[in-house]
Amino acid sequence: MTTTLRAGHTTTAALLRSATRTRALWLLVVLVALLLLCVASVTIGSRDVGLEDILAALGGSQDGFGPAAVATRIPRTLLAVTAGAALGVSGAVMQGVTRNPLADPGILGINTGASLAVVVGIAWFGLTSASTYIWVAIAGAALTAVLVYTLGSLGQGGATPLKLALAGAATGAALTSFISAVVLPRSDIGDSVRSWQIGGVGGGTTAAVLQVAPFLLGGALLCALSARGLNSLALGDELAAGLGERVALTRAAASLGAVVLCGATTAVTGPIGFVGLVVPHACRLLIGPDHRWLLLFSAVVGAALLTAADVLGRIVARPDELAVGILTALLGAPVFIAIVRRQKLSHL
């Protein structure tokens, strides 16, 4: 009997070591891919630049097109990386908190709520500072999240994936109409707001990245501290409570972290959809459902996806550009349909 138990423990330990090595290898692969995409983001644009231009820009020179372009593209790349990481983690946490495969800041209308708050602040309260945009966007995202979850919880069965998706879609459509109602009479802000609503990182600056960084770090820390608890929530609230998990506290902390991430990101980039939907599903295929690894992978893969979309947007429409919000929507819509068909949500 003792020999059998020891053999079982040895086998389990060997499987855990193998899984850890596999995950570490995949992490190295996606980090290398992200690094290559960052290099491509700096060098590719309406006109490509070379290594000598990058070195000149890093040395402080901005003479000529090449160094000047590099100096502009580096903050843009940093914004794409941070925004993609934030949206990827936010989506993974929302899916874990709600146990809903369709949870995503865009699908649940949370990005739209943040957008409406910012637009109202600009149009009616004269907000002009990016730092105030962030606070207002986080507040709008939080209120929308509470509203969608409340609507999705009404009726029998509680907050099912189908009801949450429908509540998010209806809320997002209503808030989009409110944004139009606010913007249309204001010709002085109409063009800039409509451009911002598409979602993009083209206007990324070092100042914008530095202003949003503390909020993203705070949100990421809350999500990381909730990772073990999210694993327990995946077993169901009753079983998680039986294992000693404080379900309400874990759900509240993780939700707050996700709302801060998507609200702060939306304030700087505008609403970018489907990153939080696609990335966690792709990461689960690579490394499984353990949130201690899933959140890390979602950050790296989300950063890589948004950076790749930004680079692709510069290539397909040269010398013009396509905003990343358009490209992520083109990518995410088929994935959304595939998830709905696979989960058979009409029967939940």
Image (cartoon, rainbow, N blue to C red):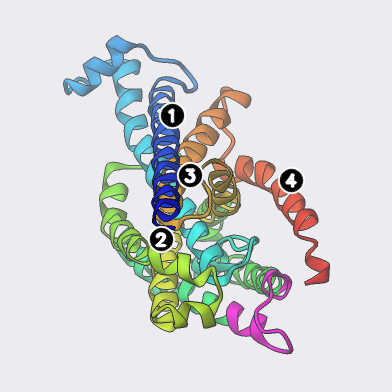
Q: Callout 3, which amino acid?
A: Gly
As displayed, is residue 339 above or below residue 348? above
- The answer to which of marks 1 and 4 sits earlier in the sequence is 1
State the predominant SS element of the stretch in magenta: helix
Upstream in sequence: badge 3 or badge 1: 1
Mark closer to the observer (2, 1): 1
Left or right, 237 with reference to 50? right
Left or right of residue 291: residue 50: left
Q: Is residue 124 visible?
A: no
Name which of mark 3 and mark 2 comes first in the sequence.
2
Per the image, label 4 sits on a secondary structure element best described as: helix
The relative height of residue 322 versus residue 260 in the rendered view (above or below) is above
Instruction: Tell me the residue at 29%/19% (across/down).
Output: 67
- The answer to whether the residue labelled 1 contacts the one labelled 4, judged by CB atoms less than 8 Å apart, is no
Coordinates of residue 338 in the picture (x, y in percent): 76, 49
User: Which one is nearer the viewer's eye here, 225 or 179?
Assistant: 225
User: What residue is shown at x 44% (from left), y 28% (from top)?
Assistant: 33
Res 108 seen here: yes
Residue 29's disc is 1
Of labels 4 and 3, earlier in sequence is 3
Dots 3, 2 in contact, CB < 8 A: no
Q: Quadrant of the C terminus?
A: bottom right
Query: Which numbered dot is residue 302?
Result: 3
- What's drawn in magenta, residue-wise? 148-166
Q: Nearer the viewer, mark 1 or mark 4?
A: 1
Spatial CA span between label 1 and label 4? 25 Å
